[in-house]
Amino acid sequence: MSEKGNKITEKELKTIKEQQQKIQTVVFDLGALEAKKFEIAVALKQFNEALNGTKKELEEKYGQVNIDLKDGSYEEIVEEVATEEVK
């Protein structure tokens, strides 16, 4: 049986309630951060897909090139052919 006199102090109860509230706040914030992280990851995927599409379009138009992002100039990518040394 529980006796009515078996209680913690008001100060102790207040401390426990404050700590529980802090934990709940942190858990909520952590959940919000995870949701935001997911949104950002989806956005990053979309941006990468768009960039890859643009790269493909540019490659079809100009061939394989390196583009200078400062001024838009480009240079063709030349594949180096390995040659054997004759001894």
Image: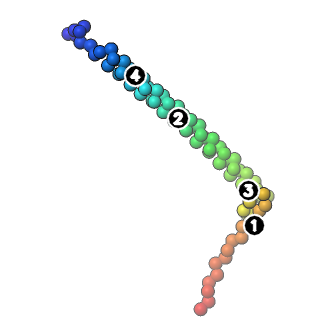
The N terminus - image quarter:
top left
Q: How many marks?
A: 4
Mark earlier in primary sequence (1, 3): 3
Alpha-carbon span between mark 4 and mark 3 = 54 Å
Mark 4 against mark 2, which lies toward the viewer?
4
Quadrant of residue 55 within the rendered picture: bottom right
Label 2 residue SS: helix
Q: Which residue is mark 2?
A: 33
The C terminus - image quarter:
bottom right
Please state the horizontal and vertical placement of residue 70, each as a whole percent of the image.
75, 57
Residue 86 has which mark?
Answer: none
Please state the horizontal and vertical placement of residue 36, each as a whole percent of the image.
56, 35
- Specify few, some or many for label 1: CA neighbours under 10 Å numbering under 14, 14-19, or 20 or more: few
Q: Which residue is mark 3?
A: 69
Q: Which residue is mark 4?
A: 18
Q: Residue shown at 61%/86% (left/top)?
A: 85
Q: Is residue 63 left or right of residue 29?
A: right
Name the amino acid type tagged 1.
Glu
Coloring applied to the structure: rainbow
Q: Is residue 41 left or right of residue 79?
A: left
Choose between 54 and 72: the one closer to the eye: 72
